[in-house]
Image (cartoon, rainbow, N blue to C red):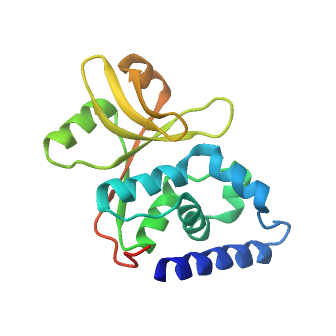
Amino acid sequence: MKFAVLTLLVWLLATVSAWALEDTPALDEKQTHAALESSGCAYMVSVMLEESMGVKTSEVDIFALLFVHGDPVRIREQRGFNFYDIKQAAAALGLRASAYRSDDLLLDLAQRKLQQQDGPYLLLKDNPEGVDRFYLYYFEDEEYVYLRDPFAGMITIERSEFNRTFVPYVLIIEGKVTEFTEV
């Protein structure tokens, strides 16, 4: 119940702040649906929270949280979220999110796994057609990288393709949700 009330308040705040911005209309239902599907960011963050912290929430709830704590004008212009928006939303939940650049992303991720830093790890794939897409990293072997795609589910991708197409940044969310824990 608390989460439903929080979600309603977040949505209301997002809508009111959008109306307050000059020349920036609020997202209508069709635009919201398109934004949710644009990069899979909200879905991937909801999966991260559920799989690593046991917090069950919906993509729509996370979208509202990302929108409220992100920059609404930039989100509309770029038609999507970025790591900064996720860091801000995580902080609102009492979590710490860290984004870093890696010269050898796969080696870095493998070392973190060995050091018991299990993640979750959010990655970004460069998309020349427009909106970049977010993926969750699980593990890799000598030939493949195992990821969760927001639209195709679990996928494997050859290491060479991964190194060629993924942006060398990773985002890690750590901590325990303090703001709310029930859905």
Q: Position of residue 102 (x, y in %)?
A: 34, 38
Which residue is more in the foreground, 14 or 148? 148
Q: Position of residue 21 (x, y in %)?
A: 78, 73
Q: Report which quarter residue 175 is drawn in.
A: bottom left
Q: Report which quarter residue 23 is drawn in.
A: bottom right
In this rendering, position of residue 162 left or right of residue 32? left
Which residue is more in the foreground, 111 or 42? 42
Outermost residue toward the left?
115
Q: How many marks?
A: 0
User: Residue at the spot x=61%, y=65% of the render?
Assistant: 67
Which quadrant, please, contains the C terminus? bottom left
Q: Position of residue 112 (x, y in %)?
A: 21, 43
User: Residue at the spot x=30%, y=16% of the render?
Assistant: 143
User: Residue at the spot x=49%, y=26% of the render?
Assistant: 165
Q: Is residue 63 above or below residue 68?
A: above
Report if residue 104 is visible in the image: no
In this rendering, position of residue 77 left or right of residue 102? right
Report if residue 14 is visible in the image: yes
In this rendering, position of residue 73 left or right of residue 123? right
